[in-house]
Structures are given as C-alpha cells and as structure tokens.
Amino acid sequence: MDRFNILYLHSHDTGRYIEPIGYDVSTPHLRRLAEQGMLFRQAFCANPTCSPSRAALLTGAYPHCCGMLGLAHRGFRLKDYGWHILHTLRRHGYFSALSGVQHIVSWKQVEDIGYDRILTSQVNEADVAASAFLMSNPPEPFFLSVGFNETHRDFPTPEPADDPRYVRPPAIFPDTPETRADMAAYRTMARRLDARMGAVLEALDRAGLAGRTLVICTTDHGIAFPGMKCNLTDHGIGVFLILRGPGGFEGGRVCDEMVSQVDIFPTICEGLGIEPPPHVQGRSFLPWVRGETLSHREEIFAEVNVHAAIEPMRCVRTRRWKYIRRFDPRRRPVLPNCDASATKELWLAHGWREQSYKLEELYDLVFDPLERCNLAGQAVYDRVLEDLRGRLNRWMRETNDPLLKGRLSLPAGMIINPVDGREPKEPTVTMDRETVWPDDYV
C-alpha cells in the first residue's frame, strides 16, 4: 500500500464522554470525524493511567512489558524509546513531529523519544503549532502527534460555561448539585477540546492532506472522577476511538468489536505492509475492518501498577464478563489515585475511605453494565470465574508479568504518594533505592 500520513490526536481523561458515543457533551467536530470515518464503540486502553496508557498505544506493548509502570513526570520511563512507533515508521521514510502533550518522558528529556521536530511544548499552543505545520507543505509521509490537556483536572471555568442546572452526572454518581457542577465543568472543557481538535482537522483539510492521512483520534483513559480513571471497570478503561482515512476507515462506520489500544501499532503496520517489530503484543484489526473475519478479539486485558500511589491490579474483559484481580492486601481505596474534585468530596463525606474491596471482582456486563454487583464468591458463577482466572493467568504468563510472583520493583528515583494519603498533591516520597512492593514499600 502507498505510504499515508498519520495524524495522532489525543486528549487527557476524556473516556467515552463525547457526542459521537451518545453522551450529552457537545463535540461537533468529533461527531463530524466519526461520520466521515469509523467509530469504535468498544475500545479500551491497556492501563487507565496517563503515561502507561500512552506508552502502550505508542509501543504496542503492555505497560509491565514496555517498562512504563507509572507517570513519566514522576520518573518512570520506557525501557527502550526505540520501541516508539515513530522509529518503526522512520525506517520506512517517515518524518515525525510533536505538538503539545506527550507524557511518556519528562519534558527535560523529550529528545529521548526521538522526534525529528518538536513544534511546541506549550499545551495551549498545540493546535496552532500543528496547524501551521500542516499548512507549511510538510515532508511526507509524516507522523504528527498532537496532544491536548483540556479535560484533565483541574477544570478551569472559561466562558461560556455549561449551566449545571441542566446537566446530568455519570450514572454511577448521585444526581446532586455537586456532581452536576462537576460534570458541567467537564462538559465545558470537552467543548473546548473539540474546538481545538477541530482546528487541526480543518488545517488538514485546507492543506489538501486529508485524503492521504490516517487520523487516529483517542484519549488515554476514563474521566477523572472517583471510580473511573485509575480503575479497571469500563468507566476507567473505556476510551473513545475514531479512525478516518486509508484502510477502510470511512463512511461513518461503527465498530462494536472489542479493540485495545495496543492493537493500533500493528494495525498501522499492516496498513503499510510492513512487519511490526518483535516487541509488539497487540494484533491488527484490519482483517475485521476488511470483512475477512467475523470478530477481532475474544478478550482484552488491562492493568494498573502505579499512578500517584502504587495500586496493582489486573483485569480481563470478554463480551459479557469482567474479572478484576486486586493485589493490595489493604483492600481499601487508594485515595491519592483519585484527583481532587467535588464528586470525590461527596463520596468521602459518605464514607468512601472506610469502604473495603474484595481481591477478586466478577461482573456480568449484560445485566450489570455499571459493574456495581460483584458476583465473585457466588457458587453459581464458579465456572465463569475459573474460566476468567485461567485467561488472566495465561496472559500474565505469556507477558512475563512480575505480579505472577506477587511483586513489583520500582527503580530508584521514582516519586510516589503514600497509599494512606488523601490527595495526589500531598507530600510525596522519592525512592532513594530500588524498592520492591510489597516487601519494603513505604
């Protein structure tokens, strides 16, 4: 296949709360993109935390394999930045450019990624810089990454702001003035995100590049509300994903097959007719797009290791079932892994800190799509539970997951929050030596 350009548009903490997925969140440019391309309604990240999710997408490898166990600005890194997709593309003639958010290395070390050009590190200029690049007769083929920050906490209150009196919060929260105001602020920022992504898409059109450019538009994980981001329910790992361009991603098609963001790297490779590197663990979904197969995946896997604090978890999801395994023997909410918000304060005021979790969770996604009723331990579901345990154990063995031995090693210099804290912005601990969880975890 002829080489096509790649425009990777990505956001922080947007989950699936956009107009094309059916939510009452005004994102007309993303709606237009979906109507022109393909909307994946069952897309999932590999890790519902910022840096690990992006690392998995860009390397095609799960976080515990590519090395990104935690947040880049707190010291975590890829084991090899040569795994980034730009290096595979470069070997086939691609020019690479970055505008705005990247979040897989600290900005002081951004050159380690290997982009040919850094357009801007200023998040509020990402759309302007990217648009100027597209209008400048750029070298082709190119890989252009444009990252946005609007839907990340904290939400500012620009004008015009959504009126919280007429907003409904996500279904897992009570309908209160606090949750309505919180969701109204998110909606306002989602509208701003849509406008800025739309500006880049408009520049792509004006430059005459749209017809030969694959647009990949997605987010890192669920929205930054309690029980969502940093959690392995679909509230946390469910993401919006829209592709438009060469390879059959056109015509307003809707995909209800499960896809993982680790599948994007090998899908690009197959579309270009090139061999993915050995480290890639995802699988191309082009055969399904072309109608050559009836399904893409029987299961997807996801993980959590460290966000602000350490909180190891793993999950497997099939079309009907979700199985989550927790490894923290405390069995309590790790509050620093939830950003401060009015909704968090509401949960805390009603005893969230004192709630306890089971180490295993099983949910029937047909009768319990909100994943609120844990079926693990009910004898009638023992066969389902054993099947999902086996699937997860097999994946952990195949990927050499360190949690098979019940331990995670954190390199020296990592910055983390104590697990018994309350907020991620509280005082942190810098590890002065390699630390093994849980043996000598502070």
Image (cartoon, rainbow, N blue to C red):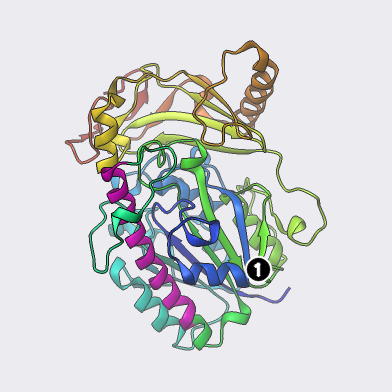
Is residue 80 visible in this depiction of the protein?
no
Q: Is residue 211 above or below residue 166?
A: below
Membership of 247 in magenta stretch: no
Decide if residue 371 is on the left or right side of residue 419: right
Decide if residue 32 is on the left or right side of residue 157: right
| Front-most of residues 383 and 125 | 383
Q: Position of residue 122 (x, y in %)?
A: 28, 68
| Front-most of residues 418 and 290 | 290
Q: Residue at x 32, y 57 (%)?
A: 109
Q: Quadrant of the N terminus?
A: bottom right
Q: Quadrant of the C terminus?
A: top left
Q: How many marks?
A: 1
Q: Which residues are magenta?
A: 176-203
Mark 1 lies on a secondary structure that is loop
Q: Residue at x 60, y 65 (%)?
A: 243
Q: Position of residue 164 (x, y in %)?
A: 29, 54
Q: Is residue 172 above or below residue 164?
A: above
Q: Which residue, given by chain and number where applicable, does mark 1 sit on?
A: 252
